[in-house]
Amino acid sequence: MSTRLLGRNNFGDPKNAGNLMSLEDAHTLLNEWVPNEKLRLHMKQVAANMKAWAIEKENADEQTALKWELAGLLHDADWEKYPDDHCRVIVEELERRNIDPDIIHCIASHGPAVFGVEPVNNMDKMIYAIDELSGLIHAYSLLRPGGYEGMEVKSIKKRLKEKAFAAQVSREDIADAISRIDVTLEELIEFIIRYQQTVK
């Protein structure tokens, strides 16, 4: 696994706590930076899962749910245009825009083995857990005539064991992420299937 270590653990300015980008501005940035429609869909799916988790499992208020959603929506925003500086570019862009440091840290920690930033709070840990698993589940949906309809948790677990399937998805990251949260793999798979299937 290649690394793009960020070389720091503090992001943004604490005085910007509560400064959130509007969803309209986030989508504008996404459309400018990410021409690839499939990659944009991945980020929208992670965003939907993050928002749903915040509301359903964390009892988040509207502003907190938006923080979770924005982190999911922008976590790979620089991947297509700046693959060698992935994460660094979006982190610096959000710092320049004076965005809430919680969002920036969450994005910076979505791949600790790659970026060298450890997930600290629940938002950090859940984006790490959701990201790779979301991609694998969507890849499986594309193979099924009915897409997500009737998709079962056991089928996803079987695909996880098949290293050749969606080979770019890190099974090690998924296992590590699950070990950091008080949620079973089965519960998270079921949750992702339920919430991301409606995202277009």
Image (cartoon, rainbow, N blue to C red):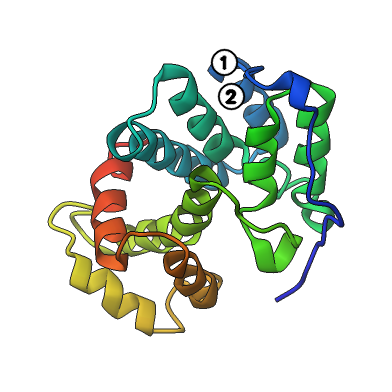
Quadrant of the image containing the C terminus:
top left
User: Residue at the location (12% across, 57% down)?
Assistant: 150
User: Residue at the location (39% across, 21% down)?
Assistant: 61
Image quadrant in which you'd find residue 115: bottom right
Quadrant of the image containing the N terminus:
bottom right
User: Residue at the location (66% across, 17% down)?
Assistant: 19
Tag of residue 24:
1
User: Residue at the location (66% across, 58% down)?
Assistant: 118
User: Along the line of sight, which residue is nearer the eye, 105 or 85?
Assistant: 105
Q: Is residue 179 left or right of residue 107?
A: left
Q: Give the residue type at disc 2.
A: His
Q: Is residue 93 left or right of residue 168?
A: right
Residue 90: where, in percent of width, then height? Answer: 76, 39
Q: Residues within 10 Å of mark 1 (few under 14, many from 20)?
A: few
Residue 193: where, in percent of width, then height? Answer: 26, 52
Q: Is 92 drawn above or below residue 142 in the view shown? A: above
Q: Secondary structure at mark 1?
A: helix
Q: Are marks 2 and 1 in contact (CB under 8 Å)?
A: yes
Tag of residue 27:
2
